Image (cartoon, rainbow, N blue to C red):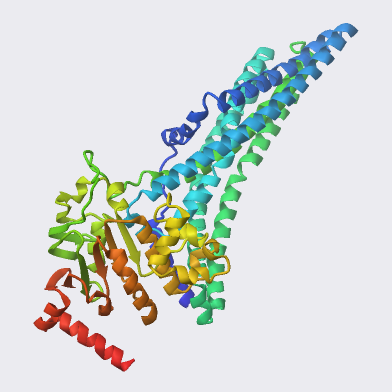
Amino acid sequence: MRNEKRKEILNRFYYQTDQVIDMPFNWKQMSRLLGYLKPYRKSLLPLAFLAVTINTIIRLVTPILIGKYTLDYAIKNKDETLLLQLVVLILSLYIVSYIANSFRIRWMNMLGQNVIYDLRKHLFTHIQGLSHRFFESRSAGSILVRIMNDINSLQELFTSGVINLLMDMFLLIGIVIMLFTLSPSLTAAIIIILPLMFFISTSLRKNIRRAWQIVRMKQAKLNSHLNESIQGIRITQSFTQEQENMLFFDGINKENYESWRNATQKNAMFRPFVEASNTIGTVILIWLGSLLIQDNHLTIGVFVSFAFYLGMFWEPISRLGQVYNQLLIGMASSERIFEFLDEKPIVTDKMNATELTDMQGKIEFDQVKFSYDGKRNALDNISLTIQAGQTIALVGHTGSGKTSIANLITRSYDATGGTIRIDDIDIRDILLSNLRSQISIVLQDTFIFSGTIIENIRFGRPDATDEEVIQAATIVGADKFIQNLKNGYETEVEERGNILSVGERQLLSFARALLANPKIIILDEATASIDTETEQQIQQALKTLLKGRTAIIIAHRLSTIREADQIFVLNHGKIMEQGNHDQLLEQRGEYFKLVQAQFRMMNIS
């Protein structure tokens, strides 16, 4: 019962963020996808096209040589010289065709891999530039599926589908011309079944495309749950919920399996249908062709050539059906990929935005309003001024608006009302990259990347030397524990820094922030998860870290903000009190109550 409830919640969240896109197949969007071939239109694409052209011409010429010329001329007239010449010519053409086909496969694989590389790079680069709201409204699994699975599903389309489509279209046109040249009446009788094929294939088109879209959606749902389960494995094990989680996973996995089974069943309907059409065409050929031979309207050689071409006729049609299925799969995936590529960041640079080359760090909020959902204000007419080099603290209960202020300073979001200025310049007039490059944030939940200690610290400034990294670590007190590790600064920290304690991860984040040398630093509950001894060590480090910088400290632990120049007490998005520690205690207001409550908790513990 609990699993059903979880699945209902997951479905509700998932369908709000990753729905089946039900639009008619349009070549405009497909041409947009094929636009990724443009960088190779003067290199790999012409080479592949040349190989296809050679192969197609040889295939069109060979049946005439085998049937009409070999049977009706060389064998019928017992011309051994002509027969030998034809045999050598046909063998030579097959060898050339083999070589051309080998190069075609090689060049097409290179082309396909390059296009997939470019598309994935473009999508990842675009997603990195999207606003925080995008990531808050979508699961990590959904985003991962778009970057990996959806793009992977296009691989076959680019490695073989596009060129095969052109090759088969040219081949089909050439075969039809040859068939009409050999026997117009016999050709007309056979291709009369093509309208029926077109009608049935068209009726299957929408169902196949929708089926593949559902497959992509179920895969994203599965990835989302896997991501959540792996990250929350400790909680699952501590509450002994492995069996229940497995049952839940089994349900999602079964949905994924059923979606694949349904899509492949619909996909598989094309080939048998083409084969049935081939059988009908062959029956017509044998019946009508025999009559035409008896009436001397058709020679044996022409009949054999016609049979070769007819066998070749259904082959490109069958492959075109497969390519069409690839196009449908590609359409389903491209719709989901372009949905992300068409997503516009909410926070963007103005056309005339400029760089702030010598930031001092003065921050001013002027009647600032902000809402996450457009309904409830997280900040309501906030006005405050932070002088350059000043350290201020934001305190208040959860949901009072402290983190929202930090989010607006970094332009993770834009204010819905009022103005925020840095050095008397509206932050919306400053280039976003330039603004963020001069601001560092240290969060409570420090993210440590896979790699070495030194690489994680250098993330703050990639061009920093080893000496500068070590100096930053030494200043914040991280050097001591780093030197005690087996490989020192070259120690691999594993995923999310699992080999490090919470306090050690936090010290690394301080070193990272110090190395970046920002003008403004924001500490968002940065010492909340640190023990008292480590906190005292960090308090010493903070004096160096904050020196000469504008600092905003968000903290519940009031011991960390005693020395702040100004303390702002927030409640429901409004500033209730402001002043330094001593002044606020004298007021015996909201701040005084917070201090008292914390002292009571410390005495109880």
Q: Quadrant of residue 82?
A: top right
- Give the answer, above or below, for where 450 lies relative to 427: below
Q: Is residue 26 left or right of residue 95?
A: left
What residue sits 58% from the left and 59% below the top?
A: 257
Q: Position of residue 268 (x, y in %)?
A: 62, 45
What residue sits 29% from the left and 53% below the top?
A: 438
Task: Answer yes or no: is residue 594 visible.
Answer: yes
What residue sits 28% from the left and 78% below the top?
A: 557
Task: Answer yes or no: is residue 335 visible.
Answer: no
Q: Quadrant of residue 384?
A: bottom left
Q: Position of residue 341 (x, y in %)?
A: 39, 44
Residue furthest toward the left?
587
- Give the answer, above or below, for where 127 lies relative to 34: below
Q: Quadrant of residue 173?
A: top right
Q: Nearer the viewer, residue 348 or 422?
A: 422
Q: Position of residue 221 (x, y in %)?
A: 48, 60
- Give the answer, above or below, for where 153 lies relative to 534: above
